[in-house]
Amino acid sequence: MVSARLAGTTLHAMKRSVKAETRPVQAMEAEALWYTAPGKAELRPAELREPRIGELLVRTLYSGLSRGTERLVFQGDVPESEWKRMRAPAQEGEFPFPVKYGYCAVGTVEAGPSPLLNRTVFALYPHQSRFVIAVERAVLIPENIPPQRAVLTANLETALNVLWDGSAAPGDRIVIIGAGIVGLLVASLAAKLPGAEVTVVDIDPARKTLAEKMGGRFAEPKDAPHDADLVIHASASEKGLALAFDCAGTEATIVEASWHGAGACQLRLGGAFHSRRLKLISSQVGEIASSRKPRWNHRRRLEAAVRLLADERLDALLGEEIPFEHLPKELPRLFAPDAPGVGALVRY
């Protein structure tokens, strides 16, 4: 595909393309961000080779920082039991350190099949100024989508999977606890369900504007609604998960969308947990939600996330832009618990 996806007959044709279809590469230099110790990172030279047939050379325009998973990597809080499962698709190095980690890269194709030259693509790739990747591992971004917004592709894919895991339906009373980037993206999708009542709960009243922009109403924890059909927990905190139990109605579903890394989280399974027959399930983007698994694969889900980018409201979630060369010294501030905004954009 050249217009909406890179798959099917056209993809196979591009993979057979001759090398004459690629543009001459003037320089093969790149730099990549490596996490080197708890709370420390540095830029290192990255070795690049000429792309082979069926591959792309991409010059990165923007990449996104994950204040959830990537913060845990930065802090060295990925538990050893998850080192293999937590590998990013293009990761180099091994946990805990040193490791090149990340999965939100958007760039321009500099070399590859001629239909893709100068086009914008998204790839699950770490923070690196240029990279070589197989055609089938890149997703073409439509020309009407700004490259900055395309950085949200991976987070949108996560939000879509969360709603699938929760079996969200029209008319549902849906409560989302945690107005981070994933929680707000879930709200943006849930609010499109006909008749759905969507409330975003957060301890920071400054998130109200963003919650309302995504189509939901906002509430602080003391005012959180109860008797919800579906509760999605995305605050990565023990108190937030406890509140999720309080908000759930009888036989409601609670989706745990946060990952706590090596941290422990106590659950209150006494009280009315059993009498209300609550259901607590996990959601993790590494697997397709079971309700979709017979028909969907990761590629189809990623392409669906790209289509969902056609929403100008999402630009409010991008946060400040940080020059790539400043990233190592800025990371402690960006990953601090009290960091402003919901996201940060790395500009190359």
Image (tube, grey):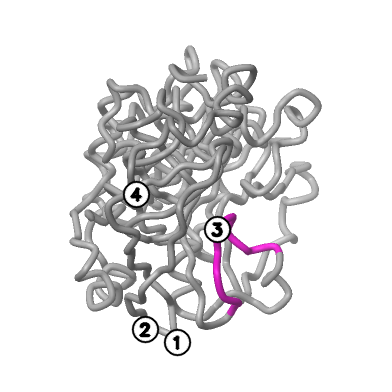
Identify the disc placed on residue 90.
3
Mark 1 or mark 3, whichever is nearer to me = 3
The residue labelled by disc 2 is 40
Q: Main secondary structure of the magenta part?
A: loop
Q: Are marks 1 and 3 in contact (CB under 8 Å)?
A: no
Whether residue 229 can be seen here: no
The residue located at (34%, 26%) in the rendering is 215
Q: CA distance from mark 2 to mark 4?
A: 34 Å
What residue is shown with label 1? Answer: 37
Q: Is the residue under label 1 in contact with that under label 2 (CB below 8 Å)?
A: yes
Nearer the N terminus, badge 4 or badge 1? 1
Q: CA distance from mark 4 to mark 1?
A: 36 Å
Q: Position of residue 1 (x, y in %)?
A: 52, 19
The structure residue drawn at horizontal position 64% and vertical position 20%, both measured from the top left corner, is 8
Residue 271 % position (x, y): 72, 57
Question: What is the span of residues highlighted in magenta in the rendered image?
Answer: 85-95
How busy is the neighbourhood of tag 4: few (under 14 within 10 Å), some, or many (20 plus)? some
User: What is the spatial separation of the Cα atoms under label 3 and label 4, in whole angstroms?
Assistant: 39 Å
Mark closer to the observer (2, 4): 2
Disc 3 from disc 2: Cα separation: 20 Å
- Of marks 3 and 4, which one's residue comes earlier in the chain? 3
Q: Which marked residue is nearer to the observer: mark 4 or mark 1?
A: 1
**Eyeballing the image, is 336 above or below 193?**
below
Amino acid type, callout 1: Ala
Say whether residue 93 is magenta. Answer: yes
